[in-house]
């Protein structure tokens, strides 16, 4: 009798672990992943926590703080002698330099 109860608990545990994978509410998504590329006309969006600087240098004065999801229009790209890449962008009618990580 005890052996039968242990088997039932084992079957219940196996069902609880593997069944949710196939259910719609929890588990793997069986749709193919969709890759979306930015077209040339779409603006870049800021992730927030960055600052626009007046020149492409870490010590340059800050022009503005960028909010999350703020549209950015790239004007040009520049690489410093130290290898850092910078973008000159326009955000909310202000221009400045943004360091690219």
Image: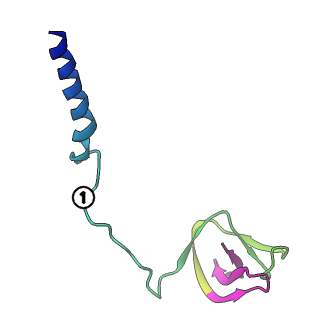
**Eyeballing the image, is 100 above or below 4?**
below
Tell me if residue 79 can be seen.
yes
Please give the name of the residue rendered at 61% of the width and 85% of the height, measured from the top-left corner. Answer: 74
Total of numbered circles in the picture?
A: 1
Q: Residues within 10 Å of mark 1 (few under 14, many from 20)?
A: few
Q: Quadrant of residue 30?
A: bottom left
Q: Which residues are magenta?
A: 75-101
As drawn, which residue projects farthest toward the front?
3
Compared across the picture, whether 3 is left or right of 38 comes to left
Toward the viewer: 43 or 22?
22
- Which corner quadrant holds the N terminus? top left
Residue 35 or residue 12, whichever sits in front: 12
Residue at horizontal 70 percent and vertical 81 percent from the top: 86
At which x and y percent is residue 42?
47, 82
Image point 19% across, 28% down: which residue? 11
User: Please, is residue 90 above or below residue 24 in the view?
Assistant: below
Magenta segment, prevailing SS (helix, strand or loop) = strand
Tell me which corner region of the image, top left, top right, bottom left or bottom right, holds residue 15.
top left
- Specify the quadrant that holds the C terminus: bottom right
Q: Which residue is mark 1?
A: 30
């Amino acid at each position: 009798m005890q052996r039968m109860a242990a088997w039932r608990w084992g079957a219940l545990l196996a069902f609880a672990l593997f069944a949710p994978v196939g259910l719609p509410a929890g588990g793997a998504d069986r749709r193919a992943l969709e890759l979306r590329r930015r077209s040339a006309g779409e603006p870049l969006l800021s992730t927030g926590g960055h600052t626009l600087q007046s020149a492409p240098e870490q010590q340059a004065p800050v022009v503005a703080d960028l909010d999350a999801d703020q549209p950015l229009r790239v004007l040009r790209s520049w690489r410093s002698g130290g290898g850092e890449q910078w973008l000159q962008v326009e955000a909310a009618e202000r221009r400045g330099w943004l360091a690219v990580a």
